[in-house]
Amino acid sequence: MNKNQKILRWVFVIFTTIVVILAIDMARNTTAPWNKKKQLVRAWEGDSTNTVELSDTTKTK
């Protein structure tokens, strides 16, 4: 095998690996279109339950 062919194969393997890693990272950080409403509900109502519980416990003391 020619030296240039070996270099080309290594560059191809490294490039493909980087692209796969980036695709996996992007897939983990994005929200599926069918989950967007659920995410909005969690964002708006997620912390309110904790503050209500905390305020209730401080009143009893």
Image: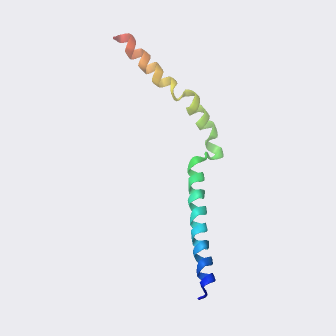
**Quadrant in which the C terminus is drawn:** top left
Answer above or below: position of 39 versus 21.
above
Question: Which quadrant would residue 12 be assigned to in this image?
Answer: bottom right
Q: Please report the residue visible at 61 percent of the width from the left and 87 percent of the height from the top.
A: 2
> Residue 47 vs residue 41: left or right?
left
Q: Please report the residue visible at 43 percent of the width from the left and 16 percent of the height from the top.
A: 55
> Residue 56 vs residue 6: left or right?
left
Answer above or below: position of 1 versus 56.
below
Q: Work out whether residue 28 or residue 40 is closer to the camera in this orientation and state it.
A: 28
Q: Work out whether residue 36 or residue 24 is closer to the camera in this orientation and state it.
A: 24
Q: Residue furthest front?
A: 3
Residue 32 on image: x %, y %: 62, 47
Q: Residue furthest left?
A: 61
Answer above or below: position of 22 versus 58.
below
Residue 17 on image: x %, y %: 56, 66
- The colour mode here is rainbow
> Residue 24 vs residue 61: left or right?
right
Numbered circles on residues, count: 0
Residue 21 on image: x %, y %: 56, 60
Q: Please report the residue visible at 42 percent of the width from the left and 19 percent of the height from the top.
A: 54
Q: Residue furthest bottom?
A: 1
**Quadrant in which the N terminus is drawn:** bottom right
Q: Work out whether residue 46 or residue 3 is closer to the camera in this orientation and state it.
A: 3
Q: Work out whether residue 37 or residue 31 is closer to the camera in this orientation and state it.
A: 31
Answer above or below: position of 49 versus 60.
below
Q: Please report the residue visible at 59 percent of the width from the left and 37 percent of the height from the top.
A: 39
